[in-house]
Image (spheres, rainbow, N blue to C red):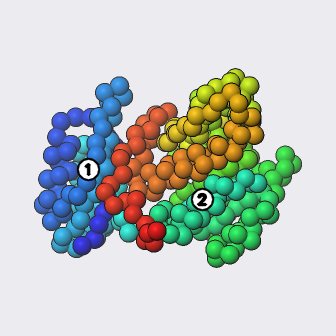
Amino acid sequence: MTKYCLTVTCPTRRGIVAAISGYLAEKGCNITDSSQFDDTATGRFFMRVSFASEEGLGIAELEGDFAATAKGLNMEAKFHDEASKMKVIIMVSRFGHCLNDLLYRWRIGALPIDIVAVISNHMDYQKVVVNHDIPYYCIRVTKENKPQAEAEQMRIVHETGAELIVLARYMQVLSDEMCREMSGRIINIHHSFLPSFKGANPYRQAYERGVKLIGATSHYVTTDLDEGPIIEQDTIRVTHAQSADDYVSLGRDVESQVLARAIHAHIHRRSFLNGNKTVVFPASPGSYASERMG
């Protein structure tokens, strides 16, 4: 049986769940997992449904017949084949812990994505990436050539058909134009528990404030630096006896885990934009299982 998921956003009203479940039942589909959220503050409804087509229907058939239902409910709805892997570009500078973590998770199948390219403004990780049979592009970025550099980056995005850009400690600020074109499709990892300690050297800022918790935040990139909708966060305890360099070392593991969890939510269509926030549903059973366990 082919497995799909259906993602839905629409104005809240009665009968949405009944309309969706009734339609799927009529089409010979069995719902295996479902999550929903009704945001009373914004009047928006969000839903993600995993299901199996017991009669072998394709996405085109499911989408075509569902169009009338979606229109009647003023609904944004999309069917996704759960076996299809999202095409992803990773961008990195000179800190490689997140990149290496993502490559490992990708290699064992814990992150079922198709990494179509790695883009960097340095050559540090060219060898490790090419050894994974992934194209590596070194595009230097300066104040003078930034528009040309971003044009080259977007050329790669378009040619590869990339659906998501992951900034795995890519230490360049993206232009407003690039942020708008890829809205909702760029995920960043910030080495701070936002909204605290934005901008440069957040670990140094945290050290100077004497905090007892440091953390990392993964968020969608917008034109407002470090202000995008938050997908995932986590923290780790620190003490007065640790240095700013200790903070950096301790933070690396948190950054890697938080970024991987945010990507996992996005590629499994669990993360929904909700104004300047997100709705992130729990993972479906089995979605964390790797192709190569142990």
Does the image show residue 42? yes
Q: Residue at x 64, y 67 (%)?
A: 117
Q: Secondary structure at mark 2?
A: helix
Q: Residue 240 appears at what percent x and percent y?
A: 68, 27
x and y percentages locating residue 281 in the rendered image: 36, 45
- Give above or below for 168 relative to 107: above
Q: Is residue 257 left or right of residue 175?
A: left
Total residue callouts? 2
Query: Is residue 193 in view from this perspective?
Result: no
Q: Give amino acid for label 1.
A: Ser
Residue 101 bears which disc, if any?
2
Q: Residues within 10 Å of mark 2 (few under 14, many from 20)?
A: some
Query: How far apart are labels 2 and 1 at the CA level?
Result: 30 Å
Viewer-closest of 292 and 70: 292
Circle number at residue 174: none
Whichever of callouts 2 and 1 sits on the residue coming sooner in the sequence is 1
Residue 9 location, quadrant: top left
Which of the 4 image quadrants contains residue 160?
A: bottom right
Whether 12 is drawn above or below 84: the answer is above
> The N terminus lies in which quarter of the figure?
bottom left
Residue 231 picture location, percent across and down = 49, 42
Q: Are marks 2 and 1 in contact (CB under 8 Å)?
A: no
Q: Residue at x 50, y 65 (%)?
A: 113
The quarter of the picture where residue 287 lies is bottom left
Q: Percent x, y for residue 137?
A: 73, 66
The circle drawn on residue 34 is 1
Report the amino acid beneath label 2.
Asp
Task: Report the side of 21 relative to 10 (left or right).
Answer: left
